[in-house]
Amino acid sequence: MHLPHQRGPLHDLPDTPEAYDAVLADVTEQALARMTPEGNLEHPDCVDDIGDTSLGITALLALAWQRGKDPRLPEAVRHSLAFHLDERVYTEDNPGYPNLRVRDSGLPYARYTLAAGAHPIGDWPSTVWALLQAVNVLDTADGLVDDEQRARLLDVAHGYWRWLTEATFFNPQEAGNQAIGCIVGGLMLARHLPSPDGESLRRQAIQLYEDKIRAHRVRDRGALLPPEHGGAYDNNYGPISLSFLAQAHRVSGEEIFAEDGDALARYLDARLTNGGFDNGGPRYSEQHSAFESVLGLRYFSARIGSDLGRYRGDSRWARHACKADGGVDGHFAWMLVWQIQDPTRWHRTASTTPARHQLRAGTVSVAFDGRMTPSLVEAAGTYYLPAAVGRQHGFGPVTDGFLMCRPMGEVRVRDVRADGLTAKLVTKPVVGRDHVLRHVRSLYVTDGTNLWTTVAVERLPGTPYLLAGLPYATDDGDRVRRTAEPRATAAADLRLTHPASGDPHHFDARTDLTQEQAAFALAADPRGYGNPDEGWSHLLTSTALEAEPAPGAPEDLHVFAVRYSPDDDAFTPVFERDGTGLRIRTEAFTAVIGDTAGDAAGEPELTLSA
């Protein structure tokens, strides 16, 4: 079973001018064949996200005319623009819309669905999208539309902005991507207004960004991020926010957008596996955007010097939004316009700067959460999620049903590179059920193909074992597919266990159920509105890779050692005291972990050699 939304890396999409002209040529032929006598360019199956879609196709046709001067397009642009202005601009309040600050304002807005009162909650983002489509038409319509139609469109676009910022609460869905999109619309609109009105609107847009978005950023893994649907980051909408920050910087030149985009890009780079797989978020835990992310990933890959384009997108939306039959849908068309206009090229090599929340070399990567527990491990082509035991999630020693990965104090990290090896040592103080403070020292070493994990902790009571991950997915060419098969060996017994119960609180990786589906089943609200991250946190048990303590460890320690590798050769590491430290010898390296007290500043000590 393949994961439906995680397909090929986005930097594999051709992004030459000729490729984009071919996309626009296809859009042109579809649009001219579809256009109704009234000028409607909406897909016949479009019901939701409809208020901006015809105008989005109009914007693409205007760009196509600007690039190719197809003589069929001027009339099509004028006719379809008239349809939007006459039929898709609403000025009477939508019955049931809950987020108004001013009733009967008479200001224009776009509807999420056309029927009055049918589903008004989506009107705010639909109006943001309509504003963005409108300013794109204004940017490219010179020589296409007459002064009267252009003035009418500008008046409607200004009205959209006022409805979004005056008649309603700003960002009512707490969705960072929508909010930053609104700011972009204001910045682009400001360029079409006469001075001083344009400069005043520009200042208002930047102030709104600072007060309503930037001031409310959420910290995760050391980064401050625009909040998304109540969470810090969503793996579908986060890269879309990155695209909006790219466009905001492109059109305004304001450094605030570049700084915040750099922070979000570095965060995404750290959590993203080498193979481009990612999961997690408060809206859709495994759904990935596609062309909507290209602008931001490409723009900021160049700025931070890392290969963000490895992000696996949904190639069914590789160029533009589309319906089940593959037909073009104008929703998100503004992003394709900007993607075509932006000349930035992909940065295709990984950053060599060590990142606290990531270990990465070759085809191996480990992403760490804010507690420096692995949130995603990639090795030997397999992706491992944190396993669950007793509603505790993570990687780490387990004793008496207690998972020792939640820190009770400062977590220290040391990064070392030597002899073609890349290593990270994480020292974490933890407290177990017996209230004894212990230091869990986790060493991760990779040569770019194999990942060796060694975990040492003061002697534990009972019969401890290492929770070493939930094997979940693997690369299959240009797709990601489900798996329940680990590719690992251990220094002692290694077992793969599965939960006995089949109810939603117990996740068995052998079933067809995806992590996202299981997470939504446990969420408090309906799918699409619930928080899958919060739902997944209710998981009691899961498929788990479990390793017994390694033989030959010093008597005062429990040591666990696992090698994630394409090879199944015997794994026989040797552990011995080195003064107050621990020496680890494997077939590939020798490492010495220093005393738990660390150096003079309390920082962990690590030496490494091949």
Image (cartoon, rainbow, N blue to C red):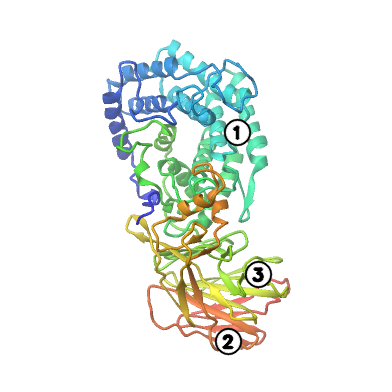
Q: Earlier in the sequence, mark 3 or mark 2?
A: 3
Q: Residue at x 45, y 46 (%)?
A: 298
Q: Quadrant of residue 214?
A: top right
Q: Residues within 10 Å of mark 2 (few under 14, many from 20)?
A: some
Q: Which residue is mark 2?
A: 553
- Camera-side residue of 379 and 75: 379
Residue 599 seen by the camera: no
Cα–Cα span, label 3 and label 2? 20 Å
Residue 52, position as x, y percentages in the image? 44, 26
- The amino acid type found where label 3 is placed reads Lys
Q: Which residue is mark 3?
A: 428
Q: Give the mark nearer the N terminus: 2 vs 1.
A: 1
Tag 2: residue type?
A: Ala
- Image position, residue 395 (x, y; %): 55, 68
In this figure, which residue is indicated by the disc labeled 1? 172
Q: Is 117 located above or below residue 4 in the figure?
A: above
Q: Mark 2 and mark 3 in contact (Cβ < 8 Å)?
A: no
Between 546 and 205, the one nearer to me in the picture:
546
Can residue 439 be seen in the rendering of this structure? yes
Decide which of tag 1 and tag 3 comes sooner along the chain.
1
